[in-house]
Structure formats: C-alpha cells, structure tokens
Image (cartoon, rainbow, N blue to C red):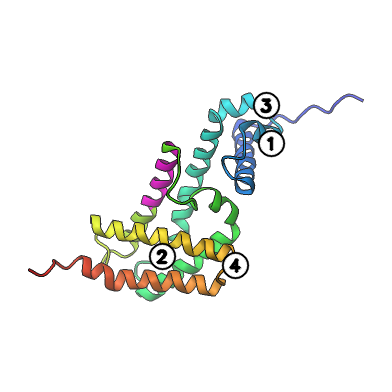
Amino acid sequence: MANRPRTRLAPDIRREEILETAGRLFAQHGYEAVSASEVARTAGVTPGLIHHYFGGKRGLFLSLLDRLGPEIVEVIRVDPTKPVRVRTRSFASAWLDWIDANRQIWMATVGQDENIADSETRAAIDAIRESVVDAFIADYPAMLPDEPQIRLMLRSFLAFNRVVLRSWLTEEVSRAEAERLLADTFHTLITNVARGLNTPPAE
C-alpha cells in the first residue's frame, strides 16, 4: 500500500509546530542534549526545513525566547492604581500560576542561571529580564524610579525569584511558601530598600 502523502501546512503553521516541538524537547532534555535533527525527526520535517526557518538549533532556541518574552511580561503586569500589597500579591500569584503551567519550558529557557556559555543566548535571556525590570518600574512609578541602583535591585530580585521557583518546582518548598516569599520580599524591596537607595548617603 502506498504511503499516505504528508499534509502540506502553511509556512507559519509549520514553523509554529516546529517551535512547539523544540520547546517540548528542550524542556524535557535540556538545550545541550537536543539536536536540530532530533527536533526535525520529532516534528516530522526535514533537517533542511529547520535550517530554512531557524538557521539551526540556536535559532530555534532564540525564537522560543522571542515568543516567551512578551508572554512573561504580560503575566507579571499589575494595576498600578491598586495598593502596593495588593500588587505584590497579585504579581506573585499570577506568576506562579504561569510557571505551574509552563514549568518545563521556563526551566529550559529563562529559568537558567547566570552561567550561560553562548553569548547570543545569554543576551536574549538578559533582554527578557530587562523587559521584566521595565515592567516592574512601570507598575510602581511612585517607588521605583528608573535609576541604575533600582534596576540592580530588581535584577537581584529576579535572581532570588529563580532560586525560589526552582525550590518550589523541586518540592523543597510549597506553593504557599514560594508565593509568600516572592510577594513579601518584593514588597519589602519596593517599600523599604528602594526608599533607602533613593536617599542620598549621609555626609
């Protein structure tokens, strides 16, 4: 019996299917353990099509980051008219909900630590983190001026966030404990630490 011809999909749909496949494989096995050929085989396409759309494995990974970045920023946004405590709790709750639904791909991409060997990949992840810092500053305009020390404080919080999330995902802490750690720490940074950074040091 003749083989059934493979359905031809529109380029945008095929590209999205490849990205979805790559995301699953990176999440399950890690970036280093997955080859472009494996992505092609699992997605049911030729390696040449991977190269045509993405230029190879690095291009696949960077395309995943391009897609995840705006989604992450949207998730963490809060209503800047709400009380600060409400905003920090809302952020922590919504963020953990998103992580719970996307835990594997987060761990494989922006959840990585600082020791990322590839400079282009590191730059893309850093760009997402800076977009998150921008969103924090926009959502707390009265407390977080866009200044170097404030940005450094927020980047440090994002590193703390990664530690808390990994501890939750590996069941070292509960969901409630992780949420409280994130919300309370962020609230303290905004209401106390940031205020001190904005005060000139005593002579």
Q: Earlier in the sequence, mark 3 or mark 4?
A: 3
Q: Amino acid at mark 1?
A: Ala
Rate crowding at label 2 as few (under 14), some (14 to 19) or many (20 or more) other CA atoms within 10 Å. many
- Asked if residue 140 is among those painted magenta in the image, a careful observer would answer no
- Residue bearing the label numbered 1: 43
Q: Residues within 10 Å of mark 4 (few under 14, many from 20)?
A: few
| Comes first in the chain, label 2 or label 3 | 3
Percent x, y of residue 71: 49, 52
**For the point 92% across and 25% down, which residue is it?**
1
Q: Nearer the viewer, mark 1 or mark 2?
A: 1
Residue 46 sits above or below residue 129 on the image: above
Above or below, 176 against 53 in this view is: below
Q: Which residues are magenta?
A: 120-131
**Which residue is labeled 4 in the image?**
171
Q: CA distance from mark 1 to mark 2?
A: 37 Å
- In the shown orientation, is residue 75 left or right of residue 130? right
Residue picked out by circle 2: 78
Question: Residue sitting at 38 percent across and 75 percent down?
Answer: 85
